[in-house]
Amino acid sequence: RCARVSPTGKHSASVLFLHGSGDTGQGLRSWVRDILTPDLAFTHIRVIYPTAPARPVISPSFQWWPYTPMRGALSNVWFDRYKISRDCPEHLESIDTMCSTLGALIQDEVNAGIPAHRIIVGGFSMGGAMALHLAGRYHPELAGVFALSSFLNKDSVAFQVTSCHPSARSARLKL
């Protein structure tokens, strides 16, 4: 499920804007519209607001992932967290699965004729963390990545990628 704002002219670039935990793509779009009235709209850029699945979801290895900080209650989140702390390991299986899902949205844009170097991903809070993993670890060819009021765990693998991956060195990181 994605909310979309189509360009008013010829579509030549795209932005994937990911919401924070508990929100939806439409909720983020409404929040942005309230702040930037009337909307985050451009003549040539499509803005896509995907919605994270309501966890618990089933993983490719057929394990359920509840959203641990909410004691398994359903919540629209991009990945699971062992706890709300920067001092714990990342739940990489849930992050990597969602990177694959979001990678399909990137591929849809490429299939529509938008080159990867004309696509930006970013997000708010947990969406920003997801965007950093997605762009840094899986899609360093993208035009850029942004994270607003976001976080990464202290030992995040996203830090390792941005410090040693040759193509990531040129990525435009906006933290």
Image (tube, rainbow, N blue to C red):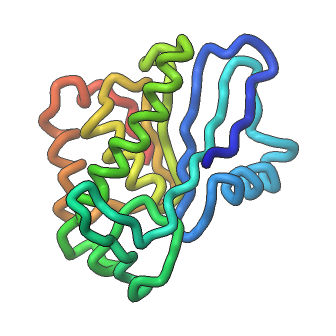
Is residue 61 visible in this depiction of the protein?
Answer: yes
Q: Position of residue 35 (x, y in %)?
A: 78, 54
Q: Quadrant of residue 31?
A: bottom right
Camera-side residue of 23 and 162: 23
Q: Is residue 91 above or below residue 127?
A: below
Q: Quadrant of residue 65?
A: bottom left
Q: Position of residue 68 (x, y in %)?
A: 35, 81
Q: Residue furthest bottom?
A: 71
Q: Position of residue 167 (x, y in %)?
A: 23, 24
Camera-side residue of 169 and 112: 112
Q: Residue at x 53, y 66 (%)?
A: 76
Instruction: From the viewer's perspective, tell me whether residue 32 is left or right of residue 93.
Output: right
Camera-side residue of 156 and 96: 96
Is residue 149 visible in this depiction of the protein?
Answer: no
Q: Is residue 136 above or below residue 26?
A: above
Q: Residue at x 57, y 44 (%)?
A: 17
Instruction: From the viewer's perspective, tell me whether residue 24 is left or right of residue 168.
Output: right
Q: Quadrant of residue 48?
A: top right
Q: Residue furthest right?
A: 38
Instruction: From the viewer's perspective, tell me whether residue 171 is left or right of residue 175.
Output: left
Instruction: From the viewer's perspective, tell me whether residue 24 is left or right of residue 83.
Output: right
Q: Position of residue 39 (x, y in %)?
A: 80, 42
